[in-house]
Image (cartoon, helix red, strand yellow):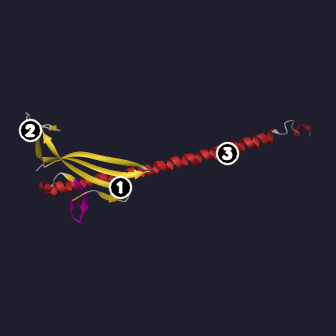
Amino acid sequence: MAWLISKNKGFTLVEALFAIAMLLLLSVGSVAANKVATAGVKINQYRSQANFLATEGMEALMSVRVQNFSGLSSGVFHPVFDGANWSLVSGPETLGNFTRTITLSSVMRNLTCFSAVCDIVSAGGIVDTNSFKVEVKIAWIESGKTNNLILNSLITNWR
């Protein structure tokens, strides 16, 4: 029976306290990791929705371009679907937490060139009536910070 009696009577108490401390540390760590993962999922949901809205805006613009390129003009617009066709309406559009704008800007081409299509210049050129610079911008506020997703393109009257 002498072998059942331990000389270190307080050792099991220290082991128990250590085990409780480790369990507490692991549980706090897992809660923190879960919070970070949940925040990451929310960020990705916002970005996915913004990407969808930007792509839809660009595709709507391409549909309008095919229907009537000569009806396009410089300015800020948003797309509207009437059940059959897309059209552009002046001003930005608010969709829940998101704001969508489609900005059309005129394109200036170099006055002198030796090719079928002259280079685009920022100043000192001639306005190309068959081209527009396009910016589809989606803005949203997340955690008190404004985020933007922007798609840029150049559209032309290809007909």
Badge 1 element = strand
- Looking at the rendered structure, the kind of residue marked 3 is Leu
Residue 119 got which mark?
none
Image location of residue 102, percent across then percent down: 25, 52
**Residue in front for this viewpoint, 155 or 91:** 91
How packed mark 1 is, by other alpha carbons closer than 10 Å (few <14, some 14-19, many 20 or more), is: some
- Looking at the rendered structure, the kind of residue marked 2 is Ala
Q: Residue at x 33, y 47 (%)?
A: 149
User: Left or right of 91: which side holds 34?
Assistant: right
Badge 3 element = helix
Q: Tell me the distance, in whole angstroms, between the alpha carbons under discs 3 and 2.
A: 73 Å
How packed mark 3 is, by other alpha carbons closer than 10 Å (few <14, some 14-19, many 20 or more), is: few
Q: Nearer the viewer, mark 1 or mark 3?
A: 1
Image location of residue 2, percent across then percent down: 92, 38
Above or below residue 38? Residue 87 is below
Residue ID for mark 3? 23
Q: Nearer the viewer, mark 1 or mark 2?
A: 1
Does 80 appear in magenta? yes
User: Left or right of 140: which side holds 84?
Assistant: left
Q: Tell me the distance, in whole angstroms, between the alpha carbons under discs 1 and 3.
A: 43 Å
Q: Main secondary structure of the magenta part?
A: strand
How packed mark 2 is, by other alpha carbons closer than 10 Å (few <14, some 14-19, many 20 or more), is: few
- Looking at the rendered structure, the kind of residue marked 1 is Phe
Residue 116 got which mark?
2
Of callouts 3 and 2, the N-terminal one: 3
Highlighted range, magenta? 76-88
Residue 98 got which mark?
1
Badge 2 element = loop
